[in-house]
Structures are given as structure tokens and as C-alpha cells.
Image (cartoon, rainbow, N blue to C red):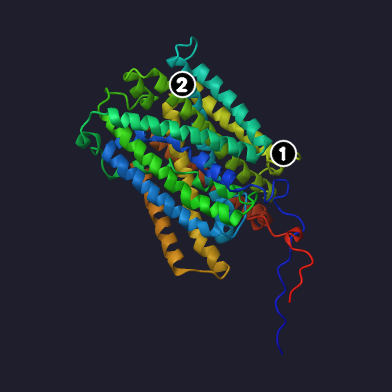
Amino acid sequence: MTAAPPSPPPLAERSPLRGLTRRELPFVPVFAQSVAAIAPSGTAVVTPAFVIGAAGGGMSVVAFLAAALLTWGVALVIRPMAQRLAVTGGLYTYVAKGLGAAVAVPVGWSAIVGYASVSVAGLIAVGTYLDQIAVTAGLAGFGGTATIVGLLSVTAVVAAVLMVRGIRLSASITLLVECASVVTVLALMGYLLTRGGAPAAHAFAWHGGNGTLAMSAVVAISAFVGFESATTLSAEAYRPFRSVPRTLAWTPVAAAAIYLIAVAAQAVALASAPAGTASSPTPVTDLLLQDDSRGLAAILDLGVAASFFACTVASVNALVRVLFTMGREGIASAAVGRAHPRFRTPAPAIVVAVGAITACAVWYLVSGAEPQDGIRSFLTLSALGYLGSYLPACLATPALLRRIGESSRPTTIFATVIAAVLGVLMVAAAGSARNDNAAVVIAYAVVLAGSVVFTAVLRVRSPNLLRGIGIYDEPQRGDLLENVTFR
């Protein structure tokens, strides 16, 4: 007797992610999310100087090239999950479906650390570079902590309004801002490259050992992190299984081209610059000022500030969607799982996240710390947070494919290799950390340990909550074609 064919899976009456826009965002806003989260133009000005000062021009080129290849490898590994699941939780949800809830909760916390830390760095950078413009222009009353705090606070309010009004609006504005910034920064990098007088052997010298290279690679990776943030928009994208995978594959490549140009230009320019320029709060601006190019310096500062504003908006957009997912699952407060009835955005989560991020940035500056140290420390912390979510995500891909019967041996091997490299890099960086970097590593370790304890408590007290983790945009009856006749 022939067995009856299996019945199709049940269709959801309502999406678990209801309240947000669904199947509306075209490719451009989705791509804009990842590009803006990386902030290639602003990062191209800020991050290379950190690495060059610590490791030299030659090691900086190697560090950025290695970071680009590793990031691209991560993108290729998580791409199959983006081709199969439309989510708002990003890597947090992917890991939940692949490795289970016990691993997903720490991954979610790690991703939150990454998004929040880069947002704090972005706000500090916006305030610092806008303040630098005022100082360059000779405006009275600028040039201190109070003005930086005021500028970043206003920036936070503007960013929050944009995000509450809608993802399409905020993503489109950030893309326009980032495109203008990229053109400006690349032109000025070309100018610096032509004016550098240092010999190549001196400009691209190597400093430090393997430990320095490991920490430099982590800082370089911080320039690429955020490329995966488009995954948090996949439930809102019109064609999520095409637009998100394309964004994952191409964003690291485009960023790498910009960064390698910036590293070469700054290595040459800083090699012939006066001592102390590399450790300046705004080293590239100082290079232009030393060349009596005040106008170009102001243009550069404006481009960097605009880029980090776009980065902050994009990073918070990703952060609040992870919080929104957790709120819907009961892992976080139910308040952050609500959506604005008119704008269809996670407005409560936006208000909470922007408030916390702004308070953190203000607290850091008011404590007497230097803005540049804050940018460096929070970017490094964000890199650790991202790496802590990338590693399990790489292991989740083969696990998920195996679970749905689509396992691939090459994918499994490649994912394992990338995960191993990420693990070695994190251990090497943690082992070589000193002074302020050690504090950053300890802070991340404390957060990660807290997430593990939180998960253990949930397992004992609320096991049903853990079983409900991993919501995604499921097919609904309204997605089916009506009155279809088969012949």
C-alpha cells in the first residue's frame, strides 16, 4: 500500500515579526545598511593611523589585507543562511536555527556589544570632527569636551528621529551621505599620496612582533565589521534571498579597495610627518593643516563626521532589530519588541538604544578621557563583539544545512577553517593585549560571561523561552497565489 504524500508545512496566520515593514525594501536600502555600518570613508581616515602608529606601514598593509580576506570568507560562509531565512535578528537568529538557543543567546549579546560599541565610537567621532571644523575655522568657544558632548548629543537626537521615521528614509540618507564622503576622502587620500616625500622602505617599515600583528589585525577587522548588518533587514526586504546575499558578498570587497588606498596614502604621509602626528586625535587633518590646506582639512573633517553619522544610524538600526527580536521572544523586555503603529519601526528599542549609547559616550568624555582613545577602544571592543558572533555563525551554517538535508562537504570544511582562524585571532589578540586594550578585552570577557550565566538561568527557570528562540518571517497564507489551476 502506497503511503500518503506528506502534508505541506502549516502556514502562519501572522508573522512573528508583525509590526515591521514586510517585503518592501528594494536592494539599494539593504545595500546601504551594510555600507553605512562599515563607514568606509570615515574608517579609512581614522583606523589606518591607529595600526600604522603601532605596527608600521608594512604590517598595516598586511593586517588590512588579511582582515579583508577573512571578512570576505565569513561573508561567504554565512551567505547560505541568508539565502534561506528572512530574519530581523541577524546572526543571532541564524545561530539559534543552526546551533540552538544555548549558543544563540551569548551570540546575541556579543552582537549587541559590537553594534553598540561602534555606535558609541561613531558618536564620539562625529562630535570630535565637527568640533575640529569649528576650531579650524577659528570659531570661539569650541575645542573642548563640552562642545564635543553637545555636538554628539544633537547628532544622537537627529539619528533617532531618522530611524523612528522609517528604515527606507534612514538607509537612503545614509547611503547618499556615505557616497559623498567616499568621493571626498578618496580624493584627499590621493592628494596625500602625491605629497608624501618619505622613501617606500621607511614608509612601509615593520614594527613589533606577532602579538602586535594579531592586535593590529583585530583593529583592522573593526574597519570591516558591520557588513553583515543587512541580515537584520532581510524580513523587511522585497527580495531578501537575493539582495542580502549579494550585499554580504560585495560589501567587504568594496571596503577593502578603499582601505588599502587609505593605508598606503597615510603610511607615506605619516612617515614624513613631524613626531606625534600619528597619535593626534585627528592625524590626517593635522597632515593637511601642516601643508597649509585649511580648506581641505575642513572638507575632510566634514566627510569623516558625515560618514560616522551614517555608521551610527546603520549600526543602531541593526542593534534595535536584534533587541526587537529578543523582545518578541521574551528574552528581553516586551517593550523593545513593539513597533510604531504608523512608521512600522521598532521605536521603543530605538529610544532605549540611542539613550544608552549617548549616555555611554558622554560618560566616557566627561570622565576626562581623550576622544581619540575612546574611538580606538570602542572600535576594538566592537571588533571583539563582532568576532564573537562571527565565529559561532560560521559553525552554524554547516549545522543548519545538515539539519535541512542540504549539507555540503566543501562548505563544512571552509566554514571550519574560517571559524578556526577567527578563534586563533581572538586568542592571540587577547594574549597580546596591554594597557587600554587589556581593559577592552576584560570588558568583553565580562559581558560574555554574563551572557552565559543569563542563559544558564533561563535554562533552569524559563526553559520554554529558550525553546522559542529563533523566530523568523514565516510564509503566510497571503503569500500564496489564489485560484491557481494545475494541468
**Residue topped by disc 1:** 343
Number of residues whose C-alpha sits closer than 10 Å to that of mark 1, classed few (under 14), some (14–19) or many (20 or more): some
In the rendered view, would you say 419 is above or below 371? below
Depth order, front residue of 179/209: 179
Q: Quadrant of the C terminus?
A: bottom right
* Image-quadrant location for residue 294: top left
**Which element carries disc 2, helix, strand or loop?**
loop
Question: Does 308 appear above or below 480?
Answer: above
Front disc: 2 or 1: 1
Q: Residue at x 47, y 16 (%)?
A: 134
Identified at 60% across, 49% down, the residue is: 89
- Give the tally of numbered discs: 2
Query: Residue type at mark 1?
Result: Phe
Residue at the extreme right of the image, as rendered: 483
The image quadrant of residue 241 is: bottom right
Viewer-proximal residue among 3 and 173? 173
The correct choice, above or below, for 222 with respect to 355 in the image is below
Would you say residue 433 is visible in this rendering?
no
- State the image coordinates of residue 302 (x, y, percent, origin top left): 48, 25
Q: Position of residue 465 (x, y in %)?
A: 67, 54
Q: Amino acid at mark 2?
A: Gly
Residue 173: which quarter of the image? top right
Toward the viewer: 17 or 462? 17
Q: Which residue is under mark 2?
A: 368
Which disc number belongs to residue 357? none
Which residue appears at 39% of the width and 47% of the height? 68
**Gap in Å between the C-alphas at discs 2 and 1?**
39 Å
Tag 1, which secondary structure?
loop
* Residue displayed at 70% across by 60% down: 475
Q: Quadrant of the N terminus?
A: bottom right
